Image (cartoon, rainbow, N blue to C red):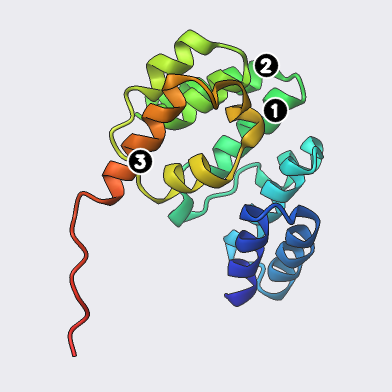
Amino acid sequence: MVTSNLALSLLTNGRTPEALVVARRTHALQPDWTSGRFYEGLAQYHLGRFDEAVQALDGLVVEWAGSGPRLTLALAHAALGDRGTALRLADEFVQDDDPYSAGLVQLALGQRAEAESSLRRVTRWDYWPALSLHHLYPDVFAGIREDPLHGWMLRQAGQWWQREPIAPIEG
């Protein structure tokens, strides 16, 4: 859906209030299209409306985004001071072999050593981790932007995306 893509574009370009309006419109136009609700939750998170983010994201599954909705839900719980729920979700990410999401929640909770251990175990820098590393969760990454860990993550994501050559278009 075009409005869904617009909402994501607005989110990644820091135009969060506009992204929220478009995400709500997307969700209203096509309630079964889960990306609209996901972007609404992301926008609420970025606007500091953590209770609203939890409401939008609780139980949400968005296939292309992998653990993105649950990760944002965990980060919203961490921001609300609900450490128990955030830790439970981080543990679920560990059990699901999702060290990227576990590491981000651990960073948000101030568990720097645990976060680095988790993040250094990431082997798949596919769509969601790469998108979120570059464009989302600046509050979570703020404390490590100058840290070698952040540089390492950026290099790993870059290598992941360049590991297969792009075939020329035929015709």
From the viewer's side, name the closer residue of 59 and 69.
69
What residue is shown with label 2?
Answer: 83
Instruction: Identify the secondary structure beneath mark 1.
Output: helix
What residue appears at the point 56 percent right and 36 percent down from the top-left corner? 71
Asked if the residue under mark 2 is in contact with the one under mark 1, i.e. CB atoms within 8 Å, the reply is yes
Depth check: give the residue in front, 89 or 134: 134
**Measuring 58% from the left and 18% from the top, which residue is drawn there?**
87
Say whether disc 3 or disc 1 marks the residue closer to the N-terminus.
1
Q: Can residue 88 be spotted in the picture?
A: no
Kind of residue sitting beneath label 1: His
Residue 24 spot, x, y in % from top left: 76, 63
Residue identified by numbered label 3: 157
Q: Quadrant of the C terminus?
A: bottom left
Sequence order check: which comes first, mark 1 or mark 2? Answer: 1
Residue at x 73%, y 41% (from the top left corner) = 45
| Mark 1 vs mark 2, CA separation in Å | 7 Å
- Along the line of sight, the residue nearer the viewer: 141 or 22: 141
Q: Residue at x 54, y 22 (%)?
A: 144
| Residue at the extreme bottom | 171
Q: Give the residue pinned by disc 1.
A: 77
Closer-to-camera residue (32/127): 127
Who comes first in sequence, dot 2 or dot 3? Answer: 2
